[in-house]
Amino acid sequence: MVDHDHGHVLSAKSRDLERDTFIFIHLQTKSKLFMGFNQKVTPVTSALIHRWVAFLIGDRGPEDPFWLCPVTLASAGIMAYRMVATGPGIDPQSSEPLPPGNYGWYFDSACTNWGLPELANSPFRLTTIAGRLEDMKEYLSEDFERHEFPPSANATAATARDQGRCRFTGATENTTVAWIIPPAVSWETQDFGRQSDWDQTPFVVTENLITMQAILKPHFYGNNFTVDVDDNRRIIILRSMGDAQRLLPSHLPDHILPTPEVDHYLRLHCRYSLNAMLLCGDVSETYSNGLILETMHNLGVNHVGYHDYHESDMVPFTDPGWTTELGREILADVMRQRLALSRYRADSDEETGADAGAGAYSDDDDDELV
């Protein structure tokens, strides 16, 4: 049983972001969701996805040439799928809108060569800035004071630079000065394992501060929107923002001349946002193997392959456990296994009968020869 709109069960992350477009990669026996989009707020093209992938890889690249190919998803077990290509690869440079649906990541235009993308070897930041700050809050009190109250000299300089106007909307009412990348989470913008990159000093600067309307701050730290500096400073919406979304124009206003220093921090915010909001979100992140096995045990489905399966072991179908999303998937898999076993037994019986028949004809032939 699957989500009727998408052909697969959605993870909590995909549901939360209301995704409608999914890119899968194949790993040995099953496929895994690697990237997803909500095109109602973030319309994409093949060319844009390729540019963002190169941006995310950065100096760890380049990514091997790849093609997106329409796919269907066949069941590969409980909450597991295997992608099957249904059409040719899409031109990597295509600027045509990408129709919502399921796609596979292939390394040839014929969509026969799959593997692990280079991007999969990059460190992911899958928690939003707000989420990471909340995780760190209890043991970084000094950093959080600086997070909430930037040094007065820097805040005053940023206000003067921005003329007291929101850099996103141009408004002057209800504005605040906030970090673009809070120093407390600055290490998240660097490669893991390089302690020198965890120095917060380069982030405690005026260039890393920005004036914005107060209503936009939780959305900016929630990575619900960001600025694609390299696309004429286009404002990208990554999650529906309600009324606040109507405040944002399509591009950063030009009432303040951009500077390379501020652009640097905006690029870091954009990379952080694309990581957190677009990457991963496979259903296995919501339904782990441990949870599936525990639920199977609770439902009385305890035999892998069900070769020694007995219906009497299962709890009654009136049990509410069968009505959950996971319970329905387990029942569907039981039915698939039962049907496969029934067909196997039927084929075996036919082969046995055919062999017996062949033996009878052989005896008759022998009698005639005598």
Image: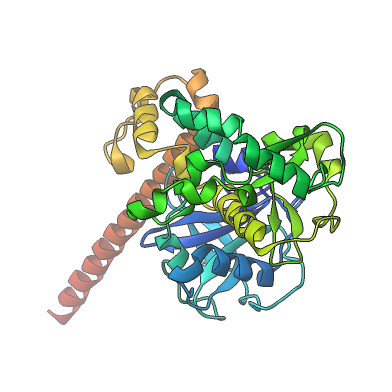
Horizontally, residue 13 falls left or right of residue 195, namely right
Decide if residue 82 is on the left or right side of residue 205.
Answer: left
Residue in front for this viewpoint, 147 or 24? 147
Across and down, in percent, residue 203 comes to 53, 48
From the viewer's perspective, tell me whether residue 320 is left or right of residue 210. left
User: Looking at the image, can residue 286 be seen?
Assistant: yes
Residue 52 x %, y %: 61, 65
Tell me the residue at 41%/20% (across/down): 315
Q: Is residue 304 above or below residue 53?
A: above
Q: In this view of the protein, which residue sits in the foreground, 77 or 101?
A: 101
Residue at 77 percent across and 72 percent down: it is 96
Q: How many marks?
A: 0
Can you see residue 1?
no
Q: Nearer the viewer, residue 79 or 165?
A: 165
In the picture as drawn, the residue positioned furthest to the front comes out as 153
Q: State the quadrant of the C terminus.
A: bottom left
Placement of 31 over or under 12, stated as above or below: below
241 is higher (above) or lower (below) than 347: above
Quarter location, residue 158: top right
Residue 113 horizontal side relative to residue 359, left or right:
right
Of 159 and 82, the residue lying toward us: 159
